[in-house]
Every structure is written in structure tokens, then in C-alpha cells.
Amino acid sequence: MQNDHNGAIADYTKAIELKPDEALAYYSRGCSKANLKDHLRAIADYTKAIELKPEYSFAYNLRGVSKAKVNDLEGAIKDHNKAIEIKSDYADAYYFRANSKKKLGIPFVSDYTKAIELKPDYLDAYLNRANSKKTLGNPFCSDYKKACELGDPQSCDCHNADCI
């Protein structure tokens, strides 16, 4: 059954009982917990995955996402920084770091730009960068246009209304 996160958690827990040094099981269980919005317990699983596999960039990134959900924005940024240190072409880590930086009032637009450079079809990065540029009074129309081309109808409306 798709999206049976509680069932997945039970399965990953059993896998961990059988093989307690398997980082992927902790990471995957953390993902299921995060999907259930149980971010504190997800953070604990991501942390265990990182202890077992210190270069686990995906675990750092998703631990950062969960930390941001519980308003540990500084911790989130540190985790995204570590994910980027391990995997410099990790578009999602730049994207989520930008989201946390934005909430803290730290310059962030360059992280959206880097995410787009690494993943040219990154719709959410275009949308967030466009909205941020618009708020900051910077040119933003090309980002709305690209988001429209990538299939976001609301961006087409914004582009047509704001950029003609």
C-alpha cells in the first residue's frame, strides 16, 4: 500500500533490530517519520544514520529539513552546509538552505540560483527566487516565465500580470 508510513516504520524498525548498523534503515525510517510530521523522531533517525555513515549527504539534508520544521533554523543551515560540503552538486541542499536563510533574514537568493544552475528544471527554486526577487525589488519576470514554461499555471498569471 502506497504511503503507509506507519507500516514502513514498523518494517524499518524490524530491519534495524536485525541489522542495527544499517544506516539506510535509519534514514528511511526517518523519512517515513518526517512524512508523518514527526520531525523530532525523524531527526533522531537521521542522526543515527549519520553516526553510522558520516558522509551521508542525504541524511544531513533531510535532517536539516526536519530541523527547519521545528524552527531550529541555525541547525538546519549547518546540516545543509554539511550536505553541500559532502556533495557540492546537491541542488536540494542549496534550495532548503535558502529557505532557512530566508526565514533568518540572511542573504539567500544566491542559493536558489545555485540550485537552478545544478538542476535547470527546479520549479520550486524558480518560484521562490521569483517571489524573493519581487519582494526585494529586483527583476523577477524571467523566473516567473521559466516557472510557467515548467508547467506552473499560477506563474503564467503572475508573469502576464506583472511583466507586461
Image: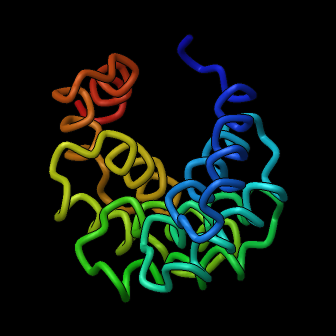
Residue 119 in which image quadrant: bottom left
Left or right of 152 in this view: 37? right
* Residue at 56% across, 60% down: 62
Q: Position of residue 82 (x, y in %)?
A: 48, 85
* Residue at 56% across, 49% down: 28
Figure quadrant of the C terminus: top left
- In this picture, is 163 found above or below 21? above
Identify the image's colour scheme: rainbow, by chain, secondary structure or one colour: rainbow
Q: Position of residue 134 (x, y in %)?
A: 44, 52
| Residue found at the far front of this picture | 18
- In this picture, is 100 found above or below 28? below
Left or right of 28 in this view: 103? right
- In this picture, is 50 found above or below 1? below
* Residue at 71% across, 38% down: 9
Q: Position of residue 10 (x, y in %)?
A: 74, 35
Residue 16 in which image quadrant: bottom right
Residue 48 in which image quadrant: bottom right
* Residue at 44% across, 74% down: 56
Q: Position of residue 152 (x, y in %)?
A: 32, 23
Figure quadrant of the N terminus: top right
